[in-house]
Amino acid sequence: MTENVSNLVLDGNAAAGLLQELFVPDITTAQIQCSACGSVGAVGSLRLYAAPMGAVLRCTHCDDILLRAVHTPHGRWLDMTGARSLRFS
Ligand SMILES: [Zn+2]
């Protein structure tokens, strides 16, 4: 059974409703999984290294960086390279 996948491809605007649901809740209660060690915990439990431009959040188990959030004159940036997943209840 082969489906025509091109019928399922839309642009990112089609995901607006789903993404809005994900990014509105309080992110500190979301469960984040560390890519380096696999541990899971609340975003609010991560270790914060605050800086004038933003924040770096590190895993409490292996100290790897899970999130970087920066506010620059050109916009707000979120880097989640170190996170495997983020789950909202
Ligand atoms: Zn870790």
Image (cartoon, rainbow, N blue to C red):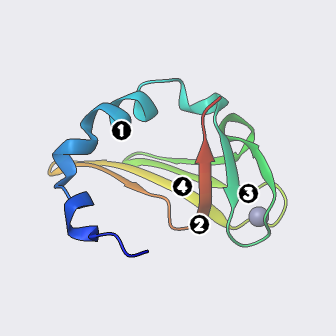
Quadrant for ligand 1 reads: bottom right
In the rendered image, residue 79, in percent from the top left (x then y), is placed at: 43, 60
Residue 74 horizontal/vertical position (percent): 14, 51
Q: Identify the mark nearer the N-term, 4 or 1.
A: 1
Q: Is mark 2 within 8 Å of ligand 1?
A: yes
Q: Which residue is mark 3?
A: 59
Do the residues bearing badges 2 and 4 touch, measured as CB atoms within 8 Å?
yes
User: Sequence order check: which comes first, mark 3 or mark 4?
Assistant: 3
Instruction: Look at discs 1 and 3 and give the one toward the viewer.
Output: 1
- Choose the circle earlier in sequence order: 2 or 4: 4
Indicate which disc residue 67 carries: 4
Type of residue at label 4? Leu
Q: In the image, which disc is placed on residue 82?
A: 2
Q: Are marks 2 and 3 in contact (CB under 8 Å)?
A: yes
In whole angstroms, how far apart are the C-alphas of marks 2 and 3?
Answer: 9 Å
Spot the residue most to the front.
Answer: 1
Q: Is residue 25 above or below residue 1?
A: above
- Give the distance between the C-alpha atoms of the residues marked 2 and 4, in whole angstroms: 7 Å
Marks 1 and 2, the one that precedes in the sequence:
1
Q: Is residue 89 left or right of residue 81?
A: right
**Element on which disc 3 rests:** loop
Q: Amino acid at mark 2?
A: Gly
Residue found at x 79% / y 69%: 37
- Asked whether 26 or 21 is in front, the reply is 21
Whole-percent x and y of residue 45?
A: 75, 39
State the SS at label 2.
Answer: loop
Verify CB contact (< 8 Å) between mark 4 and mark 1.
Answer: no
